[in-house]
Image (cartoon, rainbow, N blue to C red):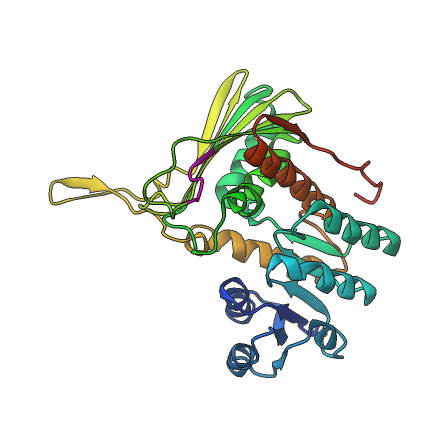
Amino acid sequence: MTQRAPLRVAVIGTGKMGADHVRRIEEVVSGARVSAVVDVDAERVKAVAARVDGCTPYTDPATALAAPDVDAVLIASSGPAHEAALLAALARDLPVLCEKPLTPDSASALRVLEAERRLGHRRIQVGFMRRYDAEYMKLKSLLETGQLGRPLMLHNRHRNAASPPFFTSDMLVSDSVAHETDVTRWLLGQEITAVTVLRPRPTTSAPEGLQDPQFVVFETDGGAIVDVEIFVNCGFGYQVQAEVVCERGTARIGDGHAMVTNMAGRWGGTIAQDFLDRFADAYDRELRTWVDATRRGEVTGPSTWDGYTAAAVCEAGVRALRDGGRVEVELVERPSLY
């Protein structure tokens, strides 16, 4: 049997996330290699390319996507740059894995969705990696059995040790709670119809002016109530937890008790300090799944519709944060492609 050539991937964005994906494709995932890297920082992109055999550095995404040795695209640049890269990839009918957000707002996300719809087939997978986390996958499988009955409530906790210096109060919703937005829709199989954001007393550990923590409440079209505690300056580590409350039982993930130690009169475990640490296996599984599906000529995983919906929900959340009260989510009619 003739062995198929590896998928040749252009990685756009070589910051923390992009560089980690370059490493993952080269060292962890089989069936693919990085043929191009793109970044506006010419020195940084050259340094990343120099570590990968046969990899060409670019500062312009369109030029990279036109290269003859690019079969697929992984977008890990900043959110505002996503739309142009996505549209360029669709114009060349290239398969894409795009880190969240699809785009920073629902209007631009809708433009991407319409471009893919006109193409007539899916090309984009959005990088909501929690769907590939072993614990979340187990919780999803349990809910699908129906053993616990209908979901009534979903409690989420999302904590970071410290926020980046550029983080704003809006970004707690648009960049962090975006994950819970997708997880809610995926786990429950329901759309989010309204958002309310409550503002507890800010922690003294947060930079001045940052509203941290926040307490976000989602309503769904299936009658479930979902809450998210988002706390990005908790000080002790990175923690993601979820508990679903159903008619006949509950299920909780994220306690981090995979290993508990007993020593010197103390017991305990460790808390991840970073999302790349906590979700390392999920990122590996996501990339393997994307590469395998792409080589088969298929597109699986979170869709452009999922990315658009997350953007619309987060927009409603930001309005609720700024203005107070309950804000309804406005969505276009779901196209048949999705």
Main structural element of the magenta stretch: helix, strand or loop? loop
In the image, residue 45 above or below residue 93:
below
Instruction: Specify whether 14 is left or right of 192.
Output: left
Span of residues in magenta: 209-214
The reply, left or right, for residue 299 in relation to residue 278 is right
> Which of 232 and 297 lies nearest the eye of the viewer?
232
The image quadrant that residue 143 belongs to is top right
Q: Residue furthest left?
A: 264
Residue 60 in the image: state x and y as whole percent.
Answer: 68, 75
Q: In which quarter of the image is the N terminus?
A: bottom right
Q: Identify the residue shown where x is 38% and y is 50%.
A: 162
Image-quadrant location for residue 255: top left
- Which one is nearer the viewer's eye here, 143 or 64? 64
Q: What is the number of callouts on the image?
A: 0
Confirm whether residue 140 shows in the render. no
Name, please, the residue furthest toward the top.
Answer: 247
Q: Nearer the viewer, residue 228 or 128?
A: 228
Is residue 318 something that shows in the picture?
A: yes
Q: Which residue is drawn at 53% across and 55% down?
A: 283
Indicate the position of residue 137 as horizontal and vertical percent values: 55, 40
In the rendering, at what x and y percent does residue 269 appear? 27, 44
Residue 281: x and y in percent read 48, 53
The question of residue 63 being in magenta is answered with no
The residue under the point 54% across, 21% down is 148
Please tell me which residue is depicted at 71% across the width and 48% down the height of the picture.
Answer: 303
The quadrant of the rendering that contains the C terminus is top right
Reply above or below: 187 against 273.
Answer: above
Residue 177 falls in which quadrant of the image?
Answer: top right
